Image (cartoon, helix red, strand yellow):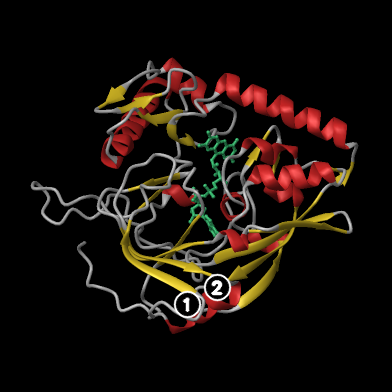
Amino acid sequence: MSVPPLTPPASGRGIKVESEASLAAFIWFRTGGPAETLVRPDTADDLAAYLRDLDPSTPVLPVGVGSNLIVRDGGVPGVVVRLPKAMAKVSVHDGRVRAGAGAMGITVASAARDAGIAGLEFLRGIPGTVGGAVRMNAGAYGRDVSDILVEATVVTRAGSVEVWPAARFGYVYRHSDLPAGAVVVEAVFSGMPGEPAVIGAEMDRIAAEREASQPLRSRTGGSTFKNPEGHKAWALIDAAGCRGLTRGDAQVSEKHCNFLLNLGSASSAEIEALGEEVRDRVKAHSGVTLEWEIQRVGIAAPSPLRGEGRGEGQPSSAAPGTAPHPTLSPEGRGL
Ligand SMILES: Cc1cc2nc3c(=O)[nH]c(=O)nc-3n(C[C@H](O)[C@H](O)[C@H](O)COP(=O)(O)OP(=O)(O)OC[C@H]3O[C@@H](n4cnc5c(N)ncnc54)[C@H](O)[C@@H]3O)c2cc1C
C-alpha cells in the first residue's frame, strides 16, 4: 500500500486486529484489495476504547456485508471495522425492535413480523446490515430507514458512545449526516400494530418481486446510481443503450440495468470504469448526470502509467465534523 504502515493498538481487550485482511472474501462484489487493518470488537465499549487509543489521523471505515460497496483494488488504508455476530442480536420490547448493527435487515423484519409490528417489511428486501441501512438511509417501496428509526447508538471516531435520536442523522434520500469514522452499533426501530400473517404475506411478496426483478444470486452491489429527481436510473441507463454493456468481466445486468455485475474475474477498477462509462453515456443521451449510490472506497491499484495510483474521486472538502474517509468518493457520500 502507498501509505506508511499503521501502528494500531494491538489485539486484546475484546478486539481482534488483523493486518492486510481480505475484504473481497465477504463483500458482495467479491473484488478489491485488503484492509490495511481489520478490527472486530467484542462490544461497543471495546470499540470505543480502541478508537480512543488510535492515532486521530488514522482513517476508520465501518463495513457491514458490503452489499453497497466497491472496494478498490489497492485496498483500504487505515482501520476497517466489522461488527461480530455478538453485535447482531435482535429483540422486541414495548412494540419496538432493538437490533445490533451487525444484524441483517431480514432478521429485523422477521422479528417485527413475529411481534406484530408492521412497517418494517421493506427491510426484507435489503440484503445488508442494520449499520449499513442506518448509514445509507436504505429503503424500498416508498419507505426508508428515516420512517422507522427511533434512535441509534453510535461510537464516534474519537471513541465516545452516544445515543443519537433519528433527527440527528439529517436523513435525505439514501444519505445521512453520520460523520466518516463513526460506527453505528445498535438501532431501535418502531412501526405500527399489525397482523403477523398480513406482515408475513407482504414480506413474501417483496421477496418474490425481488427474485423476479433483481440479480440476487450474482456478485453485485445493488442499485449503482441514485434515482435522479423525476427519473428512474434504470430507465435512463436502458434508454442510453447500456443494458448488457461489458468491460472485462464487469457487466451491466441484463435483468436490472441499474445493477453492475462481476461475472467472475472482474476487478474493482473494471466495475468502476464501467459505471463511469454508463454515466457518460446517460449524460450524452439524456443530459442527466447520474450520481453514484454505491459507496466506492479505498485506493486504486498501482498503475505502471500513473506510478502510485491513488484512487480517483479523492474528496477535496467536507463540512466540519463530517470529514469523509480519505478514500471515500464524494459522490458516494451523496454530495
Ligand atoms: C441485491 C441487492 C439489492 C439491494 N436493494 C436495495 C434496496 O432496495 N434499497 C436500498 O436502500 N439498498 C439496497 N441495496 C444496497 C445495500 O443492501 C444497502 O445500502 C445496505 O443498507 C448496505 O448495508 P451493508 O451492511 O451491506 O453496508 P456496506 O455495503 O458494507 O456499507 C455501506 C455503507 O454503510 C457504511 N456502514 C456499514 N456498516 C456501518 C456501521 N455499522 N456504522 C456506520 N456505517 C456503516 C459503510 O461505511 C458504507 O459507507 C441492495 C444491494 C443488493 C446487493
Q: Secondary structure at mark 1?
A: helix
Q: Amino acid at mark 1?
A: Leu
Q: Which residue is mark 1?
A: 51
Q: Which residue is mark 2?
A: 156
Callout 2–callout 1 Cβ contact below 8 Å:
yes
Q: Secondary structure at mark 2?
A: loop
Left or right of residue 248, residue 143 in this image:
right
Q: Position of residue 29 (x, y in %)?
A: 39, 39
- For this rendering, which residue is in front, 253 or 33? 33
Q: Amino acid at mark 2?
A: Thr
Q: Quadrant of residue 237?
A: top left
- Judge whether residue 118 can be spotted in this image: no
- For this rendering, which residue is in front, 45 or 274? 45
- Residue at 87 percent across and 43 percent down: it is 116
Q: Position of residue 110 (x, y in %)?
A: 74, 42
**Residue 70 higher or lower than 93, as above or below:** above
- Residue at 41 percent across and 80 percent down: it is 54
- Judge whether residue 15 can be spotted in this image: yes
